[in-house]
Amino acid sequence: MFADDLTVRTHCQELYRKLQSLDRKDFQNRKAAAELYFLRQGITFNVYHDERGTERIFPFDPVPRVIDAAEWEHIETGLTQRITALNLFLYDIYHDQQILNDGVIPRFYVEHAKHYRPEFRGFDVPKDIYIHICGTDLIRDKDGKFYVLEDNGRCPSGASYLLENRNAMKRAFPGLFQEMRVRPVDSYPNDLLEMLEYISPRRDENPVCVLLTPGFYNSAYFEHCYLAREMGIQIVEGSDLIVLDRAVYMRTTRGLQRVDVIYRRIDDDFLDPVVFRKDSVLGVAGLMNAYRAGNVALANAVGTGVADDKVMYYFVPKMIEYYLGQEPILPNVPTYLASEEQDLKYIIEHLPELVVKAANESGGYGMLIGPCATREEIANFRERILSDPRNYIAQPVMSLSRAPTWCEGQMEGRHVDLRPYIIYGDGVKIVPGGLTRVALKKGSLVVNSSQGGGSKDTWVLTRK
Amino acid sequence: MLSRVANSLYWMVRYVERADNLARLIDVNQQMLLDNESLDSERLRAFWRPIILSTGDEELFNRLYDNAGSSEVVRFLTDDESNPNSIVFCILQARENARTVRDQLSEDLWEELNGLFLYIRSEEAKWLRVSNPQRFYENIRRSAVTFLGIASSTTMRGEQWDFMELGRHLERADKTTRFLDVVTYLSDGDEEAATGTVHWPAILRSCGALGAFRSSERSVTAPSVVNFLIFSRNFPRSVRFCIDRVDVCIHRISGSERGTFCNRAERESGKLLADLNYGLTSVAFSVGLHHFLDNLQARFNAIGDAVFECYVLMPDRIKSYQPTELRSAYSTSNWQMQQQQQQ
């Protein structure tokens, strides 16, 4: 909201003025009303390792984060470029592997990626799309530029919070929206449904799409229900589906009904106990047979996890150049690969200044933030990196930008990131905005909901 | 509709209905005790024991409690989560079932049930339960009734509604027979209680039937109460009325004509309804009231089981397929829970 010299940035002036005119007490009451709305609606996530299945609301900060039109256009083209390259990359490594043959990416990295699925090489996925829904994490550094922190190309969650934050804002602060020209976000469920229908293998009839959830103990269960209801499709669990003659059916009170497209919110490993983890009770036996026979489409496709590997992230700018012949519009955060000798040396020498990440963890786990770590933690990570360098990357500490946030009765700056949701179907669609996550603890750089993060509504403005 | 969804809707409503009935049962009996404050602890035990016996959870109760005084019985029936038929457990289960079908419920309906859940977990409820139990139970009953009202004004009339109605009326019929069964256990050595002068009105009130009863019957006698609560055509908590609704719903679900059957569920409900339509109170007494009620409960269960088999398990449609442990009351193993969380 503020420029370096503490003046209010042009596109935020209107909001600033409105916020100034609100009474402190009134503001607090409206915030409480919004929180009650979340609680009563059950817009909660489950806290794991808690026997009673405690649910918490995802803390909501009522001060919107504003992005002006030009900034958003830049992000939009950058993300479109990125997902296009990622899908070309996935197609390539599951087919001819030209990028590996040409030595742009060392073969070793792909073949040793935890989520690479060589058994799917040569298999054509519907419309050649692998990542249908991507939740890319962006941050703004002190230079004011947006950087890509990671691409979440498996089952990114959080889109429902993006929609519900907007609903809560509209309820609690209708006045703030006036004359602000905030672009609506409510097209998301429809965009998602159109994409699902687009990839259906059966074109002759109305495709039957379902959302496959792990079940109601999953932390994102609310989101699964929410999206299914908004799209008007069934939410199913593994035990609701069966595979007969290499086609998928759901068990209904009227008998079995054919399913064409599955928006799956469970990981590859659990999808089919016949092929992947034998002990999975969440999946559907025979699903991979139906998938390979082309009788059902999955979003996202099986095997996209290889692109989520943090080592692969390092190569995304190279993919963009290789497949599209373009310069990356949104840069990566500078990254060091522990398996490259030079980088390793640098990492080991500079551990207290770096952020180290395990290649295949998410949710803020398996991470070392050098400047905040104890000596033991650093020693521990040094051991881990040296014993398995392929699995670690390091990045300089980025100073995430801050946004005004309501903290205990007053406004303070808190670090934020931004996760827009990209839908790749018949063209690329990105809902204007995304989920702005905010680290509520003063000075903290960790925005994950599991570790004390909250979220804000994100306002993308239309051009004047 | 998904079979699992049908099952969850059915149980969601059943559990809400059960919580409502239990709240009324406890409230009525607590109030009745106020009229009989002179009871010593021996007599007090005799007062609550039939209530525990009639719920069918005596064994569990004896395992958990040494003493059957008011506070123990009330705790057991209200907020003991190790009792799968306590009010709190029922509300938790209703909500868990609702959560699994959240996408099928109207926002208002979910909010009401979730509100009830938040209430029983709140400090306010804990405080009321001790300081003003009447209010505590009234809040639960009001919420249950509101839930019912919202359900009936926001649910599409179709399979969804039919499964919910089916669950509600089956549960109601069951509870009415259980409340009646209280008299069975009264006569144990207590002559005064055996006449049931105190208990009959309490039973009527537990079924919310006292007013309706008075307007159509002259005096409170054993046969008149039994006749009313089992065979009344028009009272919405009588067994006959409930089974009539059950039969309507079951036939609407399959689309077959009433009076005919195309599956076991329809046959069970049709047969039971015919027995009730042509039944006599005198027959109930001649076979023994307890035996008669016991038999009714077994037949309610048979209907429930047949519905489950016919619409959820579908053994004849999916011969080759062994479902991964589908249970009628929704519950998840720890292992399943772990995997769901790993995603």
Image (cartoon, grey):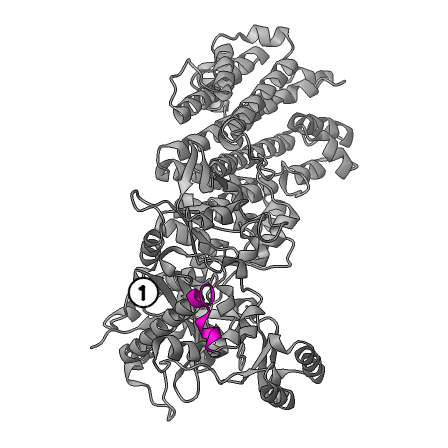
Question: Is residue B171 visible in this depiction of the protein?
Answer: no
Residue A343 left/right relative to A78: right
Image quadrant containing the C terminus of chain B: bottom right
Label 1 residue SS: strand
In depth, the one of A168 and A149 nearer the eye is A149
In depth, the one of A248 and A410 nearer the eye is A248
The residue pinned by badge 1 equals A429
Q: Mark 1, chain letter?
A: A
Does residue A93 belong to the magenta stretch? yes
Q: Residue at x 67, y 27 (%)?
A: B56
In depth, the one of A123 and B57 nearer the eye is A123
What amino acid does circle 1 point to? Lys
x, y (%) of residue A340? 59, 84
Q: Which residues are magenta?
A: A90-102
Q: Residue at x 32, y 85 (%)?
A: A9
Does residue B174 belong to the magenta stretch? no
x, y (%) of residue A77? 31, 75
Residue A56 left/right relative to B164: right
Image quadrant containing the N terminus of chain B: top left
In depth, the one of A387 and B142 nearer the eye is A387
Question: Up-down: is A411 above or below B276?
Answer: below
Residue lying at the far left in this picture: please name it.
Answer: A464
Residue B72 left/right relative to A73: right
